[in-house]
Amino acid sequence: MNSSNTLSTHDITRIQDKLLVETTNYAYEHSPYYKRKFDDIGLLPSHIKGLGSLDLLPLTSREDIQENNWTFLSVPQQDIAEIVSTTGTTGDPVFIALTSNDLKRLASNERKSFSYAGVGKGDVFHLSVTCDNLFIAGIAYYSGLVELGASVVRIGPQNIVRHLDLIKKIKPVGIVAVPSFMVHMARFMIDSGIIADELGFKKIVLIGDSIRDADLKNNALGNLIESIFGNICYSTYGITEAQLSFCECHMHLGLHSHPEFVLVEILSDNDFVLPDGEIGELVLTPLQIKGMPLLRYKTGDITFKMSEPCQCGRNSVRIGPILGRKHQKLKVKGVTLYPKTIENALLGIKDIVNYQIEAFIGDDRTDHIVLRVGSCRNDNDFIILLKDLLKAKARVTPQIEINHPEEIEKRLFEGGSRKAIIFKDRRLKSYEE
């Protein structure tokens, strides 16, 4: 285990006190955005003494970066080594500039995460995510594995036949993939009579959608994947703006942070700091970033944190699975839920090809949902099955429309979006989806 995570809680606090002061001073001295922000509210870097004064710092939103993107840049242009971008489905993209030191930090963060999952020197990993198109995750996982001493098969997005052919020939120990890709692979394997033992995976590191529920046990997505591949999955959470990720250890009791790289807070709807275990918005202050430092960044993701030592022996703060996006919270006939709850309820239904969830304000001024399902089935029994499953698993019964899968595909990528718009929010407030 890395020494920073075997330190006592007291020693971690001491280190983070120092790093927060350094990060605050650096942001004030080098970031035009934070220099102006501090001056506007009458805050001096000297007011920040450590973690106890973290709540004095201003909160930073995605909209702040969108509106002032390049005023966050804290180095001369010639010191930029890489520019990446977030992948929101609407609105202006956010560009993040990294220095060579930031890239080393990124690799170190992923090296630690992979080591928590038991990956070691000489292990061969199949990397199914792209390293192109301004996507930070691909280069992060690639560089982290290389720094750890593992070998990487960097294939990226390809058709499933190409992936399986390569996996059978090279026999990697593990794979890095998004959960939907593993579901696609599992279904293809079932249809083709391929069993998991033929692939030889010992570890599956999943990025993007969570495979755990709030109780840290598998959700429907996790159950679907592990029913085919076995209990070898490790869930992660990554965020482009903070240039880092969180990863499970072998105990699967939450996602570990790396204390020298990030401070974790959970805030209420009114921006009050919440104690351990309470669900709210994840707010991150990344440490040791030079290109575009951020202070108290509101991720928009809903989860909770755990500060007690993990059963693996590490004392780093952990977060729970991402339960949804703050602006996507729905309240339907007294039931509060997120679109992911509906998505999980639909998993495993063989006749569903694709779908889109749409929210709108009804005549009664409350949230309503339309679920548009792409399927070749449109019989009454199928609709009853969908309603029963949604009522049992999501506690709601939305309006259901059955369309041809091609029609849903057009809706998912409407307006030239490069990312499928699974949740379309037509409520009164204008949010980024």
Image (cartoon, rainbow, N blue to C red):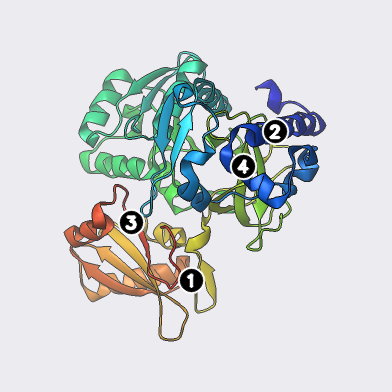
Name the residue rendered at 68%, 39% in the picture.
317
Instruction: Tell me the crowding category of disc 2: few under 14, some 14 to 19, or many 20 or more residues within 10 angstroms, Cα based.
Output: some
- Secondary structure category for the residue under label 4: helix
Q: What residue type is labelled 3?
A: Ile
The residue indicated by pointer 1 is 395
> What's the distance in space between the residues labelled 1 and 4, CA to CA?
44 Å
Q: In which quarter of the image is residue 344?
A: bottom left
Q: What residue type is labelled 1?
A: Arg
Work out whether mark 4 precedes mark 2 in sequence or the reverse, and give the earlier one: 2
Q: Is residue 344 rendered to the left or right of residue 54? A: left
Name the residue rendered at 25%, 59% in the picture.
351
> What's the distance in space between the residues labelled 3 and 1, CA to CA?
23 Å
Query: Is any part of residue 79 visible from this angle?
Result: yes
Please tell me whether residue 388 is drawn above or below residue 166 in the rendered image. below
Frontmost residue, 322 versus 381: 322
- Which mark, residue 421? 3
- Which mark, residue 381? none
Frontmost residue, 191 versus 418: 418
Q: Is residue 70 rendered to the left or right of residue 349? A: right
Work out whether mark 3 precedes mark 1 in sequence or the reverse, and give the earlier one: 1
Q: Which amino acid does label 2 sit on?
A: Asn
Looking at the image, do the residues carrying marks 2 and 3 touch, with CB atoms under 8 Å apart?
Answer: no
Measuring from the top left, give residue 119's x and y in whole percent. Answer: 51, 23
> What's the distance in space between the residues labelled 4 and 2, CA to CA?
10 Å
- Which mark, residue 25? 2
In this rendering, which labeled residue sits more in front, label 3 or label 4? 4
Query: Is any part of residue 202 visible from this angle?
Result: no
- Secondary structure category for the residue under label 1: loop
